[in-house]
Image: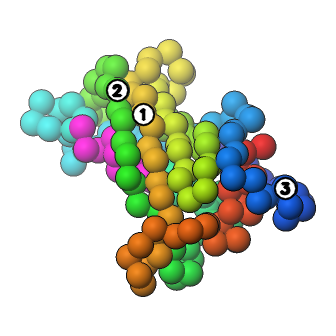
């Protein structure tokens, strides 16, 4: 299992965080290993297309947790990050019993819109199974409306991913 990235101990000055548009300057991916169980597959033993979405969300939630954002705490703050746009390309099937690595990284943050890229590949990196992109938007749980800005604690932590 890959070692979890350690959060940075020092955040940039608040003035630097206020930028409207951030682009990831790192090529580092968060890696989340998965194993295909029977309930992940269709009757032919091939991973069902919806399973990939679950794995992608699990990887994203674990990536956020690794930088100090526990999704349950985020919800407790009144903020949710629902998917508003999704694009997937299936390259090769995965079958029951196989293992794979779900790789994710935040690639862009513009206001309350956050883009994440994905690759699902074989553990040795030789086979590419899926590529995708997900766009999230911060929503105020109580009002059910898109927030004007991310909660500062969330924005501060996400800035770590853009380094």
Q: For marks 1 and 3, give the CA distance.
A: 29 Å
Task: Look at the numbered disc 2 and give the secondary structure of its residue.
Answer: strand
Q: Position of residue 74 (x, y in %)?
A: 55, 73
Query: Which residue corresponds to mark 1?
Result: 132
Residue 88 magenta? no
Q: Residue at x 61, y 56 (%)?
A: 111
User: Is 18 above or below relative to 92?
Assistant: below
Mark in front: 1 vs 3: 3
Task: Look at the numbered disc 3 and give the secondary structure of its residue.
Answer: helix
User: Is 146 above or below relative to 144?
Assistant: above
Q: For marks 1 and 2, give the CA distance.
A: 6 Å
Type of secondary structure dominating the magenta stretch: helix
The front one of 126 and 15 is 15
User: Is 101 above or below relative to 110?
Assistant: above
User: Is mark 1 in CB contact (under 8 Å) with mark 3?
Assistant: no
User: Is 35 above or below relative to 150?
Assistant: above
User: Is mark 1 in CB contact (under 8 Å) with mark 2?
Assistant: yes
Furthest residue to the left? 43
Q: Position of residue 78 (x, y in %)?
A: 51, 80
Q: Is residue 86 left or right of residue 148?
A: left
Query: Which residue corresponds to mark 3?
Result: 16
Query: Which residue corresponds to mark 2?
Result: 89
Q: Position of residue 156 (x, y in %)?
A: 74, 63
Q: Earlier in the sequence, mark 1 or mark 2?
A: 2
Q: Is residue 5 left or right of residue 118?
A: right
Instruction: For label 1, count other residues whose C-alpha is less than 10 Å away and answer few (under 14), some (14-19) or many (20+).
Output: some
Q: Which residues are magenta?
A: 49-58
Q: Which quadrant holds residue 36? A: top left
Residue 54 magenta? yes
């Amino acid at each position: 299992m890959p070692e979890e990235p350690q959060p940075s101990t020092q955040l940039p000055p608040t003035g630097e965080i206020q930028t409207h548009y951030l682009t990831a300057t790192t090529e580092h991916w968060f890696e989340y290993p998965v194993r295909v169980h029977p309930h992940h597959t269709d009757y032919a033993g091939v991973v069902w297309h919806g399973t990939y979405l679950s794995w992608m969300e699990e990887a994203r939630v674990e990536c956020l947790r690794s930088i100090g954002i526990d999704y349950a705490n985020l919800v407790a703050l009144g903020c949710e990050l629902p998917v508003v746009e999704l694009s997937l390309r299936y390259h090769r099937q995965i079958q029951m019993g196989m293992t794979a690595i779900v790789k994710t990284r935040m690639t862009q943050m513009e206001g309350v819109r956050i883009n994440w890229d994905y690759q699902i590949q074989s553990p040795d990196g030789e086979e590419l199974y899926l590529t995708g992109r997900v766009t999230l938007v911060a929503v105020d749980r109580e009002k059910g409306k898109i927030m004007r800005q991310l909660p500062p604690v969330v924005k501060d932590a996400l800035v770590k991913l853009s380094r």
